[in-house]
Image (cartoon, helix red, strand yellow):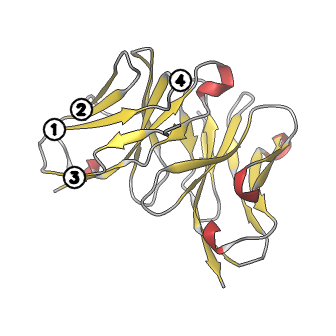
Amino acid sequence: AQSVTQPDIHITVSEGASLELRCNYSYGATPYLFWYVQSPGQGLQLLLKYFSGDTLVQGIKGFEAEFKRSQSSFNLRKPSVHWSDAAEYFCAVGSNDYKLSFGAGTTVTVRA
Amino acid sequence: DAGVTQSPTHLIKTRGQHVTLRCSPISGHKSVSWYQQVLGQGPQFIFQYYEKEERGRGNFPDRFSARQFPNYSSELNVNALLLGDSALYLCASSLNGGAFSYEQYFGPGTRLTVT
């Protein structure tokens, strides 16, 4: 069965510093991978996706993620964090029954 | 274009009651999925519907049911509510076809509180 692990429950980063959020997945076939962001009390916004091809994918809001098949990872990065990036981030994998399986999420706090 | 819309925004129900949540997909999207997000956790898949047919079902009891209408909107019904059903219920829509079935766009959710 497919699963997603986000090892970091909470990350605190200074404004202007770089950010990396880790995601590891378990899925037998070629995965469809996604990162979503959720602000408090809101729905999920799609940041970026990986289906195939170039393993470095660009998303919205200056985010990027790199797919590494050998490590079963899909880590999210941003070179310079803004205060508005404070939110909860979810990694998800699409399985063969049309559902998305989500990790438990990483909460990002941005300090001035 | 409008995104995915859900109603109501908030709902308070008593144990044992029934609830209906509604969702309208993005224009042109024919697939609708429902997720339950308990506080502090990631969303859990409940159902996916396409062309009014159930295409996927998560590990939820039969108290949970859904349907999709000819205009592709959808309803999620939960019977005999339990305290543990308190959660944010998210609806997502997607195009159909290959990988795009998985590229799901979410609505703002309905916050259900069961007392």
Q: Position of residue B72 (x, y in %)?
A: 41, 22
Q: Marks 3 and 1, Cα distance to the nearest angstrom?
A: 12 Å
Q: N-terminal of the two: label 4 or label 2?
A: 4
Q: Position of residue A21 (x, y in %)?
A: 71, 61
Q: N-terminal of the two: label 3 or label 1?
A: 1
Q: N-terminal of the two: label 3 or label 2?
A: 2
Badges 4 and 2, same chain: yes
Q: Please tell me whether residue B62 is drawn above or below residue B8 in the rendered image.
A: above
Viewer-closest of A45 and A55: A45
Closer to the eye: label 1 or 4: 4
The picture quadrant where one finds residue B53 is: top left
Give the labeled residue for mark 4: B28
As helix, strand or loop, the secondary structure at mark 2 comes to loop
Q: Marks 1 and 4, Cα distance to the nearest angstrom?
A: 31 Å
Viewer-closest of A79 and A30: A79
Give the labeled residue for mark 2: B63
Q: Is residue A32 left or right of residue B67?
A: right
Q: Is residue A5 left or right of residue A67?
A: left
Give the labeled residue for mark 1: B18
Residue depicted at 31% across the width and 26% down the height: B66
Give the labeled residue for mark 3: B83
Q: N-terminal of the two: label 4 or label 3?
A: 4
